[in-house]
Image: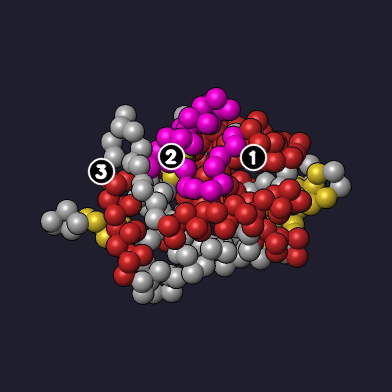
């Protein structure tokens, strides 16, 4: 199975200060030297950033802008049909550019008026504790690289398309933005790493890959679905299970493939009650209990 650390390509800094992003062999950009150099440059900018600095301004190249335009163009009609209402309202309210990749400070400025969230740069993996602690303060760690242009349909790693189009719009919604913050507040109560992993899996099967019934239709509210025009076309054909915290918190997942199993809520209210209720009340002890119940089930 894939652990969270494998979602991102590892980033290292050499003795001479050179930053390298290690793309695995199956990555669409693994054998493209130009793409690899680009990834190193963008990761180096994030590593050089310090809190309080403006976010790095990336001068996106034509191929990167084209990926952004393609994804925005392809996703627009799909969002119209398949995204939950709050997400569609956020698309209008934030009015992020669809013809160029926005800067992180630009995203923060739009979110500040909508919901008070702020984007900060991430070179790659941000450890779970740091990532969730920031969510509790309405700060979102975001990568700035763009997926390889050969595969605009899907990316094995969270790129800026995912972070901004998926999460950015969710953060601007009253329900799902607040659920991100509540997940962060929950993580601050957890001491055990196993509890944190459980929380991150519940997050994965809700705020990343959640679907729910709204106006009698199955719609997506997960950032992973809403930012992938390959995935969004598929989700109604996936195996759908009712919300079940024990299962969601313990099921293994593989980010490199489309998710075969999704958890479906019957309403926004059910997400609030089950997932939001879990975020608000979970402790190491209650999670340990859920994990034990799952083991004997
Ligand atoms: Fe995500």
Residue behind label 2 places its C-beta within 8 angstroms of ligand 1: no
Q: Nearer the viewer, mark 2 or mark 3?
A: 2
> Quarter of the image holding residue 41?
bottom left
**Depth check, front residue: 18 or 248:** 18
Give the residue drawn at x 67%, y 46%. 221
Q: Secondary structure at mark 1?
A: helix
Instruction: Magenta stretch: give its range.
Output: 94-121
Residue 185 drawn in magenta = no
Give the residue drawn at x 47%, y 43%. 102
Relative side of 205 to 219, left or right:
left
Q: Earlier in the sequence, mark 1 or mark 2?
A: 1
Decide: few, some or many residues near mark 3? Use Cα within 10 Å; few <14, some 14-19, many ≥20.
few
Give the residue drawn at x 27%, y 60%. 20
User: Which residue, given by chain and number where applicable, does mark 3 sit on?
Assistant: 48
Disc assigned to residue 91? 1
User: Which residue, given by chain and number where applicable, does mark 2 sit on?
Assistant: 104
């Amino acid at each position: 199975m894939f652990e969270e650390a494998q979602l991102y390509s590892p980033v290292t800094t050499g003795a001479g200060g050179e930053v390298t992003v290690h793309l695995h062999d199956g990555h669409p950009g693994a054998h493209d030297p130009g793409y690899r150099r680009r990834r190193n440059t963008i990761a180096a900018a994030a590593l050089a950033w310090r809190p309080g600095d403006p976010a790095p301004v990336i001068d996106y190249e034509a191929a990167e802008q084209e990926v952004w335009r393609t994804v925005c163009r392809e996703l627009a009609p799909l969002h119209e049909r398949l995204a939950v209402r709050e997400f569609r309202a956020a698309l209008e309210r934030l009015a992020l550019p669809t013809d160029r990749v926005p800067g992180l400070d630009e995203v923060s400025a739009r979110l500040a008026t909508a919901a008070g969230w702020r984007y900060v740069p991430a070179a790659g993996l941000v450890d779970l504790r740091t990532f969730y602690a920031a969510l509790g303060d309405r700060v979102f760690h975001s990568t700035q690289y763009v997926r390889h242009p050969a595969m605009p349909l899907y990316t094995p790693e969270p790129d800026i398309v995912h972070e901004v189009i998926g999460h950015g719009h969710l953060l601007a919604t009253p329900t799902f933005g607040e659920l991100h913050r509540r997940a962060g507040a929950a993580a601050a109560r957890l001491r055990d790493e196993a509890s944190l992993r459980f929380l991150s899996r519940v997050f994965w099967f809700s705020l990343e890959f959640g679907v729910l019934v709204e106006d009698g239709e199955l719609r997506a509210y997960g950032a992973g679905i809403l930012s992938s025009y390959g995935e969004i076309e598929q989700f109604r054909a996936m195996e759908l299970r009712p919300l079940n915290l024990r299962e969601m918190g313990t099921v293994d997942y593989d980010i490199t493939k489309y998710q075969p199993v999704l958890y479906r809520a019957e309403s926004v209210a059910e997400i609030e009650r089950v997932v939001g209720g879990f975020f608000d009340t979970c402790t190491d002890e209650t999670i340990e209990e859920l994990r034990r119940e799952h083991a004997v089930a």
